[in-house]
Image (cartoon, grey):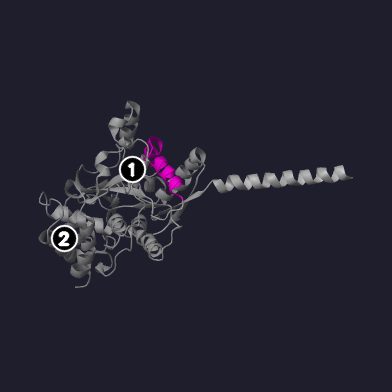
């Protein structure tokens, strides 16, 4: 009788130990809360269907993608900072430009990440120096780079306007068929910055002067009556503009990423006749980054995710046109010959109507000023 009870107790203890052991292995696999703009389904799919399974397999880490506008998660971090929350809710964020400067100035970032990574020589070294003119100082890690380009439906636009003069004439002849996002949106602001280069050819060195900026505001005011809804409303963001373009409400969309149209064409969102071009053969070039907040409870795991997102296999995968089409941040001279050829083969053969030169983006302060001036000079009058 006593032996039987002992055996039962032993079995019960063993079962409890198995349950606890199972729970322990789950708790050790900490999830990384990755906050990022979620307006592009191809990017979302890349994280959910490519990166997440890879990171789970290689690092035993669950990535929890949290879709949120950049301004919103920046406000969230500011609030956590103001109340002294040390155990934060965000582990990893996608950031660049004005948002990076704001986070840096407000001390919302974890610190020098570069020294914690393996083989930092793998990156294009220029991408480690400044972000929209702001010294990076190791606070963020490059994830991708893109050029600002336009997409046009060539079924509707038989002779696409490739210069600023041709675009002006086309908008005048086709009222209601062109628009751009609000300047608070990163793409909308990028369009205005692109216009400044196109209207001041070979004249801008660094940030534009007030006179150079006013040329763009005057231009936008002139075309305003012929825009979608006569310029009384603007798409809130790129996602809305893409939807309008996909449903043929307008004939153009735009964005940072010269390869961005291909996934949309392949999944049927964009017309097969969609082609890409840069205005006046110039394109504002922009890099985007990953960083860790000051109060991430999971910095070590977040660093491992950054390692994964910036390794060769994940960079090569996101460069594919049917995945994301986002540019690589890897230095070619640090890769094998086969790897170099692989990346270069994925960067060519796209549906481009012209070639272009890359132009440096403006400072974070200038980007913010352009948003404010756009409202004063273009929207309110």
Q: Secondary structure at mark 1?
A: helix
Q: Which residue is pictured at 19% across the width and 66% down the height?
A: 373
Furthest residue in direction right, as rendered: 1
Q: Secondary structure at mark 2?
A: helix
Reading the image, the residue beneath label 1 is 114
Estimate how packed mark 2 is, as few (under 14), some (14 to 19) or many (20 or more) residues with alpha carbons within 10 Å. many
Q: Quadrant of residue 80?
A: bottom left
Estimate how packed mark 1 is, as few (under 14), some (14 to 19) or many (20 or more) residues with alpha carbons within 10 Å. some
Q: Is residue 61 left or right of residue 347?
A: right
Depth check: 67 or 28 in front? 28
Furthest residue in direction top, as rendered: 337
Depth check: 11 or 328 in front? 11
Q: Which residue is pictured at 12% across the width and 61% down the height?
A: 210
Q: Is residue 323 left or right of residue 10?
A: left
- Residue 378 placed where, x, y %? 20, 68
Q: Is residue 14 left or right of residue 73?
A: right
Any magenta on residue 293? no
- Residue 6 placed where, x, y %? 82, 44
Give the quadrant of the C terminus: bottom left
Which label belongs to residue 216? 2
Distance of label 1 from label 2 (alpha carbons) = 38 Å
Q: How many marks?
A: 2
Q: Which residue is pictured at 33% across the width and 56% down the height?
A: 245
Asked whether residue 258 is in view, the answer is no
Q: Main secondary structure of the magenta part?
A: helix
Asked whether residue 217 is in view, the answer is yes
Depth check: 236 or 166 in front? 236
Q: Quadrant of residue 37?
A: bottom left
Q: Earlier in the sequence, mark 1 or mark 2?
A: 1
Q: Which residues are magenta?
A: 298-318
């Amino acid at each position: 009788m006593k032996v039987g009870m002992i055996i039962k107790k032993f079995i019960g203890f063993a079962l409890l130990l198995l349950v606890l052991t199972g729970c322990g292995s789950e708790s050790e696999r900490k999830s990384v809360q990755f906050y990022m703009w979620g307006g592009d389904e191809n990017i979302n799919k890349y994280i959910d269907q490519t990166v997440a399974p890879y990171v789970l397999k290689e690092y035993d880490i669950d990535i929890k993608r949290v879709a949120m506008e950049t301004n919103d998660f920046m406000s969230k971090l500011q609030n956590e900072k103001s109340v002294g929350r040390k155990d934060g809710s965000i582990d990893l964020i996608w950031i660049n430009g004005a948002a990076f400067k704001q986070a840096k100035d407000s001390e919302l970032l974890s610190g020098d990440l570069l020294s914690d990574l393996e083989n930092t020589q793998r990156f294009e070294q220029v991408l480690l120096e400044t972000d929209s003119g702001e010294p990076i100082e190791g606070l963020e890690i490059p994830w991708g780079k893109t050029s600002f380009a336009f997409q046009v439906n060539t079924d509707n636009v038989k002779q696409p306007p490739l210069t600023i003069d041709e675009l002006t004439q086309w908008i005048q002849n086709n009222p209601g068929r062109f628009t751009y996002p609000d300047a608070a949106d990163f793409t909308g602001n990028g369009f205005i910055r692109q216009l400044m280069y196109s209207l001041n050819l070979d004249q801008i060195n660094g940030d534009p002067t007030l006179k150079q900026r006013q040329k763009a505001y005057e231009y936008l005011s002139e075309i305003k009556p012929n825009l979608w809804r006569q310029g009384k409303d603007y798409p809130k963001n790129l996602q809305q503009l893409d939807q309008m373009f996909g449903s043929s409400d307008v004939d153009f969309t735009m964005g940072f990423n010269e390869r961005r149209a291909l996934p949309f064409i392949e999944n049927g969102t964009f017309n097969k006749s969609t082609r890409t071009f840069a205005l006046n053969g110039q394109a504002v070039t922009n890099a985007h980054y990953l960083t860790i907040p000051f109060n991430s409870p999971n910095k070590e795991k977040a660093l491992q995710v950054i390692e994964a997102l910036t390794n060769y296999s994940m960079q090569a995968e996101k460069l594919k046109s049917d995945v994301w089409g986002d540019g690589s941040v890897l230095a070619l001279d640090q890769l094998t010959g086969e790897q170099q050829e692989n990346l270069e083969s994925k960067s060519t053969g796209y549906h481009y109507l012209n070639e272009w030169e890359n132009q440096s983006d403006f400072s974070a302060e200038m980007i913010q000023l352009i948003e404010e001036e756009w409202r004063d000079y273009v929207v309110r009058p």
